[in-house]
Image (cartoon, rainbow, N blue to C red):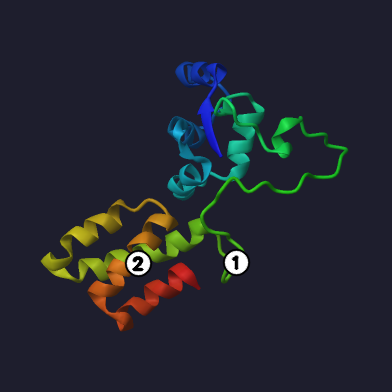
């Protein structure tokens, strides 16, 4: 789903006094009507932004779907605390935290990032650009996208540690 800032959202961003936390504000800026919610969640996973943060911004009227699109049913009506909880709506996250060991993408990133930087730094000048790409990776999805290049550069034996940290 692609979301855009509402007029109230634009004002909350300018005022800096709204109900947005600093990490939510960082994610909020990325909602430009071009990126999908899944892409934004992937880009901000290292900051701890979750679907619940996005749902809160929608509930506050700060974000809305593109004109002509509609919100999923879970967002269409206010949540009633006495009603049964609505099923979780998948906003397009890239990796499910229930896959593999059950770790979240953020936990996987935190475990894999030091390994990836160690491996690529050990390549010397021939791995300089790859090392820069790893250092610029800000999420699990970014590191996962670089994994094949790292495997090719360091070989299967050295890559095994990173593979386990990312995909176990």
Sequence-wise first label, 1 or 2: 1
What is the residue that sits farthest to the front in this orientation?
A: 68
Residue 8 in the image, given as x and y percentages of width and height: 56, 17
Residue, disc 2: 147
Q: Are marks 1 and 2 in contact (CB under 8 Å)?
A: no
Residue occupying the point 66% across, 29% down: 59
- Which secondary structure lies at badge 1? loop
Q: Label 2's element? A: helix
| Side of 124 relative to 136 (left or right) | left
Which residue is pictured at 83% across the width and 36% down the height? 81
Q: Mark 1 — residue? A: 102
Task: Relative to 100, say whether 22 is above or below.
Answer: above
**Residue 159 rendering spot, x and y as whole percentages:** 33, 76
Observer-nearest of 108 and 42:
42
| Displayed quadrant of residue 82 | top right
Q: List x then y, in percent, for residue 45.
A: 48, 49
Q: Residue at x 47, y 36 (%)?
A: 27
12 above or below 32? above
């Amino acid at each position: 789903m692609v979301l855009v800032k509402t007029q109230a959202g634009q004002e909350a961003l300018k005022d800096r006094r709204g109900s947005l936390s600093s990490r939510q504000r960082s994610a909020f800026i990325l909602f430009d009507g071009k990126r999908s919610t899944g892409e934004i969640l992937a880009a901000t996973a290292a900051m701890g932004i979750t679907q619940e943060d996005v749902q809160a911004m929608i509930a506050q009227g700060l974000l809305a779907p593109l004109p002509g699109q509609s919100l999923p049913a879970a967002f269409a009506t206010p949540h009633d605390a006495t009603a049964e909880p609505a099923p979780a709506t998948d906003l397009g996250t890239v990796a499910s935290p229930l896959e593999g060991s059950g770790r979240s993408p953020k936990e996987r990133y935190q475990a894999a990032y030091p390994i990836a930087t160690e491996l690529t730094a050990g390549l010397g000048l021939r791995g300089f650009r790859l090392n820069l790409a790893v250092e610029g990776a800000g999420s699990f999805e970014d590191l996962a996208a670089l994994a094949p290049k790292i495997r090719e550069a360091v070989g299967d034996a050295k890559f095994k540690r990173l593979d386990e940290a990312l995909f176990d």
